[in-house]
Image (cartoon, rainbow, N blue to C red):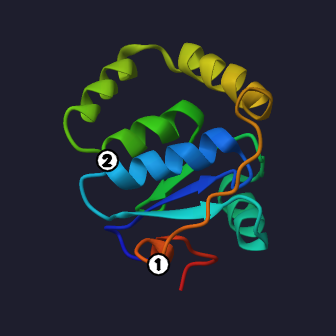
Amino acid sequence: MTETRAYLFYDGDCGLCSETVQWILRHERDASIYFIPLQNEFSRQFLTKKLGSYSMDTVVFFKNEKAYIKSDAILKTITHLKLPFTILLITFVIPRPLRDWAYQFIAKRRLTFFGQKCYLPDAKTRHRFIDSFD
């Protein structure tokens, strides 16, 4: 694992998550985010070891040996986006409990609102979807 890489653990069967991953690929500043579906065994083992728990309802952003969950994970992801999307960092002023409440509200209903959808990366981005850290 390199310090310049960031890893986003996401629900690979969620329509909202799949659409978000595609959106990030189009709007990130550089190609430093790598994507790992929560469905694989590596995710379960790695996140249980690093966080002490594992949930399919929680996005995790991992960089520099530090894990961020829920709304903090989203804010860390935003730091990798191009302008004008980094303006979304203003939401950092919202207290974490309120941000995480909104996150949980959407996370619990995401499959109802957005359905299931599995994004299959194209040849250009396939190397950014990984199964484990080498």
Mark nearer the N terminus (1 vs 2): 2
Q: Is residue 72 above or below residue 42?
A: above
Where is residue 60 shown, x and y percent of the image?
Answer: 59, 49
Residue located at (80% from left, 28% from top): 112
Q: Amino acid at mark 1?
A: Ala
Query: Can the viewer see residue 98?
Result: yes
Report whether 43 appears left or right of 87.
right
- Residue located beneath label 1 in the image: 123
Tell me if mark 1 has few (under 14), some (14-19) or many (20+) residues whose alpha carbon lies within 10 angstroms of its own.
Answer: few
Quarter assignment of residue 36? bottom right
Query: Can the viewer see residue 67?
Result: no
Mark 2, secondary structure of its residue:
helix
Tell me if mark 2 has few (under 14), some (14-19) or many (20+) residues whose alpha carbon lies within 10 angstroms of its own.
Answer: some
Q: Is residue 90 above or below residue 44?
A: above
Quarter assignment of residue 16? top right
Give the spatial CA distance, label 1 vs label 2: 18 Å
Mark 1, secondary structure of its residue:
loop
- Residue located beneath label 2 in the image: 27
Where is residue 84 shown, x and y percent of the image?
Answer: 21, 32
Which residue appears farthest toward the front when viewing the image? Answer: 122
